[in-house]
Image: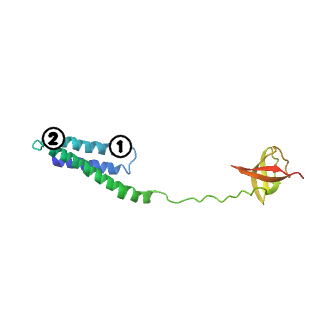
Amino acid sequence: MLASIAILTLFGIFLIMLETFLPGWVAGILGTISILAAVTLALISEDLVGWGTGSRLALVLGILTFSAAVLLTWLHFFAVKFFHRALTLTASVAAPASTAPANGAQGVALTELRPLGRAEIGGRHYDVRCQSGIASAGSRVEVIAAEPGNLLVRSIPS
């Protein structure tokens, strides 16, 4: 009977370790059930009739302590550190440099700004929004602020 309890315990530990590779909790649940079956056998087995209550409880605590120690060691040294390095992307993406022109930069409207349109500022084309609402194509504009997705400009009187 002790062999059956040991086999159930080791099989349960193996299934819980396997859970680190297999998604879905199936292996982990079956492993937990296997360990609980080993604990149940240790408590109610007829083959251990000569064992006292204290001895059976010591066996149960031994099963649970051994299982917890093996699984925590597995998670700490192997599953988390080894597989984290092997299976996790560690590259980082640098933030793009800000290419928005400074406030006060001047340019020319390429399209009619009603209020959205395109303008050339500092030799580059930008999506802009006109503060006054409307500006004709070819009119001079000045950057007031940068907004998400576009620049806020105002028309400069000629």
Left-right relation of 28 to 119 = left
Helix, strand or loop status at disc 1: helix
Q: Mark 2 points at which residue?
A: 45
Type of colouring: rainbow
Q: In which quarter of the image is residue 133?
A: top right
Left-right relation of 9 to 134 = left
Q: Position of residue 64 (x, y in %)?
A: 25, 47
Disc 1 residue crowd, few under 14, some 14–19, many 20+, Cα 10 Å: some
Which amino acid, mark 2?
Ser
Q: Where is residue 45 in the image (x, y as percent from the top left)?
A: 15, 40
Q: Quadrant of residue 97?
A: bottom right
Q: Contact, CB < 8 Å: mark 1 with mark 2?
A: no
Q: State the separation of the CA atoms marked 1 and 2.
A: 27 Å
Which amino acid, mark 1?
Val
Which of marks 2 and 1 precedes in the sequence? 1
Residue at 18% across, 47% down: 58
Helix, strand or loop status at disc 2: loop
Left-right relation of 133 to 65 = right
Q: Which mark is residue 128?
A: none
Q: Name the residue under label 1.
A: 26
Residue at 32% across, 53% down: 72
Can you see residue 7? no
Up-down: is 45 above or below 74?
above
The label nearer to you, 1 versus 2, is 2
Q: Of residues 21 and 40, which is closer to you in this image?
A: 40
Disc 2 residue crowd, few under 14, some 14–19, many 20+, Cα 10 Å: some
* Label tally: 2
Residue at 37% across, 44% down: 25
